[in-house]
Image (spheres, grey):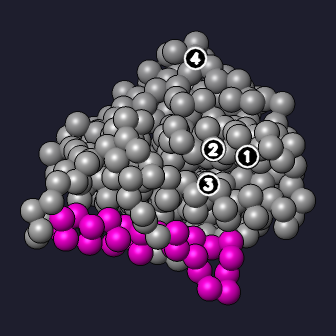
Amino acid sequence: MLILGIESSCDETAAAVVEDGRKILSSVVASQIEEHRIYGGVVPEIASRRHSEAIVGVVGEALAQSGKTLSDLDGVAVTYAPGLIGALLVGVNFAKGLAFSAGLPLIPVHHLRGHIASNYLSSPELVPPFLCLVVSGGHSHIVQVEDYTKLKILGRTRDDAAGEAFDKAARAMGIPYPGGVELDKIAEEGDENAYKLPHPHVEGAPLDFSFSGLKTAVLNLLNNAKQKGQPVSVPDLCASYRKAVVDCLAQNFFRAAEETGARTLAVAGGVSANRLLRRRFGELCQQTGRRLYVPDLSLCGDNAAMIASQGYYEFLAGHTAGMDLNACAQRSIEE
């Protein structure tokens, strides 16, 4: 079965063709990073306009690279939630028009479900049930994947997402956008024990995350050093901050694994590309006899292959939509 996936939830316009939810025939991503770098972050209005300009060419290129035509496809999957509403609407409306004109089923896909599905593409042997940590710029969830379309949130962030916390701290340190990616690189050269930073927890909800206090601690450290005229080692602060964030993620995720008895673990989302996270989680799984799955680096960020993959399983479960499908800025992964 061939599914065309379309992704436009933030600042990447993407399209891909995937066979049977596991084999990528093509994957095309048009990034807007250089344009948004000027502003230090994603500007929603610009993102929407660029999606409108790019989507026809991106979808056409994905079909061309796959060697398939619309008549070969079995369905059109599209990210409909969550994300920037204007950006989502571009992808949703294009997918609706394409599906209608080609007489194909329209398959709505939750963006975070897509991130989880990136592991099916990188590791075809992975099948539910398993426990997944979904960490990105907008979300930090511990998800129990009971089946391909049956998911349960065990823990989530109460404020900033892990990726957002990386980006905001990086910006405070003067690191250019995309800050989290650059912070990870710089941290490789620093001493992770140079600065003592808090490891926040949520009282009464041991599996939930809170990163706003950690971010504030870095801002205060930088401001105090500036007022006193003291130097701050950016590589050391990057390494110390990265360690604190990864420690919080690891503590809660592996606690969830203990509580649920999960032996198969996965990580997904943009932050799954973080070097320390991959090392630390790999070590912890080795120590506890668990199996860890992480996506290929090319599939950690937003892409349409993951949407096509999850779309395949949504279609098998009978989850299709009509022409009244609308985009949603916020929606639970459980729905």
Mark 1 and 3 residues: CB-CB less than 8 Å, in contact?
no
The nearer-to-camera label among 3 and 4 is 3
Q: Quadrant of residue 152?
A: bottom right
Position above or below: 58 against 173: above
Of pointers 1 and 3, the one earlier in the residue sequence: 3
- The image position of residue 301, as x and y in percent, is 49, 40
Query: Which residues lie in the magenta part?
Result: 199-225
Identify which amino acid the numbered label 3 is placed on.
Val
Q: How many marks?
A: 4
Residue at 52% x, 69% y is: 199
Mark 2 and 1 residues: CB-CB less than 8 Å, in contact?
yes
The nearer-to-camera label among 2 and 3 is 2
Return the residue found at the far right.
Answer: 261
The answer, for residue 105, to whether it is visible in the render is no
For label 3, the residue is 134
- The image position of residue 268, as x and y in percent, is 62, 46
The nearer-to-camera label among 1 and 4 is 1
For label 4, the residue is 66
